[in-house]
Image: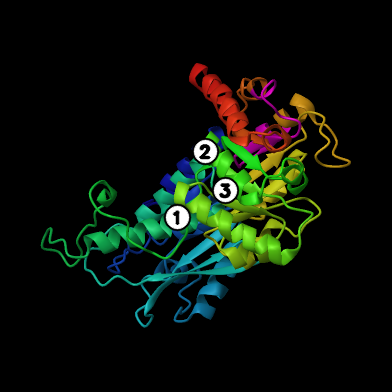
C-alpha cells in the first residue's frame, strides 16, 4: 500500500540502488470491499515509474479500471484488453485478477506476457473471509519466484494456494466486519484440498536426474519400466524418458507404466521432446532442446501445471527459456559424451556462465558419472540444483546399484557444503 507519490518515488530510488532479482507489484489502490486506499496523484507514479521496474503487476479489476482512467471491465475480453494496456506501462508480465467479477461462477484471472494470454480458472469459494487475498497472492508469487519457479508457474501455485486457503477458511467466524481474515497456515492441520492441478515443481527434485536410453536398455536386457524402477529404487529424484528408437505406440504403453511407477514413488516423470506422449500418459512434464518447439508453445499445449525443461548452452538461451516460461534448464555437455552426437563440450566455465545468468534452476548434464559428479556440485554455482545422468546409470548391468552409489556421492557433497 503506497498512499502517496512521494513514497512511490522513494521506493523506486531504493530499488535502483538495491536491485532485486524479481519485483512483484500489487498496486493496492482499491480494496476488495471497494474502499480507495491511495491518493489519486499516485496513479502517474505507479504507471510511469514503478510499473516499468516490475517483473509482474497484479491489479484486481477495480484497480485495473482505475489505472486505465475508469474504463469498465465486465468480461474476460475486457480483462484481456486491460492486461494488454497495462503491459504497455512497462512490466514484463501482467495478471488482471477477476475474483471480484460479480457475474462469474469461476474465479478467472488473465495472465499476459506481451504475446500470449492465459486464462487461469479456479473455483469461486463462497465465504466472507476474503480479507487480504490480493496481498497473499502477490506474496506467494514472490516466494515461488525466490524458489526458482517460472513466472507462469509461480502465479498458478499462488492462485492454488489462495484458493485452498479460502476453502479451508470459509466457515471461520472472526471479527464483526463484513470481511473476515482467512487462514494462511491451513496446511499445518488440514488435508490437501483437491484443486485439480499437478504437484507443483520443486527444484530440489533435480538433484539426481535419471535420463533413460533405449539402446542402453536393450544392450543390458532391461525394459524401460525395469530401468526406471531400478533408478528410483537407487535414489533418482526425477526421471526423463528419452527413447529415440521405439515406435510411438510401444513408447506410450511404456510411458504409462513408468508413470504409474513414478507416481507411486512420488518421483516426477518427464518425456523428452514428445509432447503428444506426455499428454497421452499425463506425464509431469516435457524436456525440449533448442531444435524442438519452444517452451512457450509447449506451455500452451500442456498448461500451467506441468514441468518444462529446456536444454541450454549459453546465457542468451537461458534468458529466452525463462521468458518462454520454462521451469528449469539442462546445461551441457559439461564433459565429453557419446550419448548425443555433435554435442559441444562446455566445461566448467560454460556451465558457470549459464548458472550465473540463469533465473531458473539448472541441472548439469553431459559425461557425468561417479568419478566427476562430485566435482560438478563442489563448484557451488548459483542455481545449480543437481546432475543429469544417462550412461553412468543405464549403460550398466545393475541400474539401482549405480544410482545408489551416485546418490551417495552427491549427498556427501551436499552435506559438506
Few, some or many residues within 10 Å of mark 3 (<14, 14–19, 20+) = many
Across and down, in percent, residue 184 comes to 28, 51
Gap in angstroms between the C-alphas marked 1 and 2: 29 Å
Question: Mark 3 = which residue?
Answer: 53
Q: Are marks 1 and 2 in contact (CB under 8 Å)?
A: no
In the image, residue 380 sits, relative to residue 244, either above or below, namely above
Range of residues picked out in magenta: 353-373
Left or right placement of residue 403 versus residue 295 in this view: left
Q: Which mark is residue 233?
A: 2
Q: Callout 2: 10 Å neighbours few (<14), some, many (20+)? A: some
Q: What SS does tag 3 mark?
A: helix
Q: Residue furthest top?
A: 416
**Circle 1 or circle 2, nearest the eye:** 2
Q: Residue at x 46, y 41 (%)?
A: 10
- The answer to whether residue 35 of the structure is visible from this angle is yes
Q: Which dot marks residue 157? A: 1
Q: Earlier in the sequence, mark 1 or mark 2?
A: 1
In this orientation, which residue lies closer to the viewer: 274 or 56? 274
Coordinates of residue 102 in the picture (x, y in percent): 34, 79
Q: CA distance from mark 3 to mark 1?
A: 23 Å
Name of the residue lying farthest toward the front: 221
How far across and down, in percent of the image, does residue 353 sit? 73, 31
Residue 138 or residue 107, whichever sits in front: 107
N-term mark: 2 or 3: 3
CA–CA distance between discs 2 and 3? Answer: 47 Å
Residue situated in front as seen by the camera: 383 or 301: 301
Q: Is residue 284 visible?
A: no
Q: Is residue 258 one of those drawn in magenta?
A: no
Mark 1 residue element? helix
Kindly report which numbered mark, 2 or 3, lies closer to the viewer in this rendering: 2
Classify 255 as above or below 61.
Answer: above
Left or right: 202 with respect to 342?
Answer: left
Amino acid at each position: 500500500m503506497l498512499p502517496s507519490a512521494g513514497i512511490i518515488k522513494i521506493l523506486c530510488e531504493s530499488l535502483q540502488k538495491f536491485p532485486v532479482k524479481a519485483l512483484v507489484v500489487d498496486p493496492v489502490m482499491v480494496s476488495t470491499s471497494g474502499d480507495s486506499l491511495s491518493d489519486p496523484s499516485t496513479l502517474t507514479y505507479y504507471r510511469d515509474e514503478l510499473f516499468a521496474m516490475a517483473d509482474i503487476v497484479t491489479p484486481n479489476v477495480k484497480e485495473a479500471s482505475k489505472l486505465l482512467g475508469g474504463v469498465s471491465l465486465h468480461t474476460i475480453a475486457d480483462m484481456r484488453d486491460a492486461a494488454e494496456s497495462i503491459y504497455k506501462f512497462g512490466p514484463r508480465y501482467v495478471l488482471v485478477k477477476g475474483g471480484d467479477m460479480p457475474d462469474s461462477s469461476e474465479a478467472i484471472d488473465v495472465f499476459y506476457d506481451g504475446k500470449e494470454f492465459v486464462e487461469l480458472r479456479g473455483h469461486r469459494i463462497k465465504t466472507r473471509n476474503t480479507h487480504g487475498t490480493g496481498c497473499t497472492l502477490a506474496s506467494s508469487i514472490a516466494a515461488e519466484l525466490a524458489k526458482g519457479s517460472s513466472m507462469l508457474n509461480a502465479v498458478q501455485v499462488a492462485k492454488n494456494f489462495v484458493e485452498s486457503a479460502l476453502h479451508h477458511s470459509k466457515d471461520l467466524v472472526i471479527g464483526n466486519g463484513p470481511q473476515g481474515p482467512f487462514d494462511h497456515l491451513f496446511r499445518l492441520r488440514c488435508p490437501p484440498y483437491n484443486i485439480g492441478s499437478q504437484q507443483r515443481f520443486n527444484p530440489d527434485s533435480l538433484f539426481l536426474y535419471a535420463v533413460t536410453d533405449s539402446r542402453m536398455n536393450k544392450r543390458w536386457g532391461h525394459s524401460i519400466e525395469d530401468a526406471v524402477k531400478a533408478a528410483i529404487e537407487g535414489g533418482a529424484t526425477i526421471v526423463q524418458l528419452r527413447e529415440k528408437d521405439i515406435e510411438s505406440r510401444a513408447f506410450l504403453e511404456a510411458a504409462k507404466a513408468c508413470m504409474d511407477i513414478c507416481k507411486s514413488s512420488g518421483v516426477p516423470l518427464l518425456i523428452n521432446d514428445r509432447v503428444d506422449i506426455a499428454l497421452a500418459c499425463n506425464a509431469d512434464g516435457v524436456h525440449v532442446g533448442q531444435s524442438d518447439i519452444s517452451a512457450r508453445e509447449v506451455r500452451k499445449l500442456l498448461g500451467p501445471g506441468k514441468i518444462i525443461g529446456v536444454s541450454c548452452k549459453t546465457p542468451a538461451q537461458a534468458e529466452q527459456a525463462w521468458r518462454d516460461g520454462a521451469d528449469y534448464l539442462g546445461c551441457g555437455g559439461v564433459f565429453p559424451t557419446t550419448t548425443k552426437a555433435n554435442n559441444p563440450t562446455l566445461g566448467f566455465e560454460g556451465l558457470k556462465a549459464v548458472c550465473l545468468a540463469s533465473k531458473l534452476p539448472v541441472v548439469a548434464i553431459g559425461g557425468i558419472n561417479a568419478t566427476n559428479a562430485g566435482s560438478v556440485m563442489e563448484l557451488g554455482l548459483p542455481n545449480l540444483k543437481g546432475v543429469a545422468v544417462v550412461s553412468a546409470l543405464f549403460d550398466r548391468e545393475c541400474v539401482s546399484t549405480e544410482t545408489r552409489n551416485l546418490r551417495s556421492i552427491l549427498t556427501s557433497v551436499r552435506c559438506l557444503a
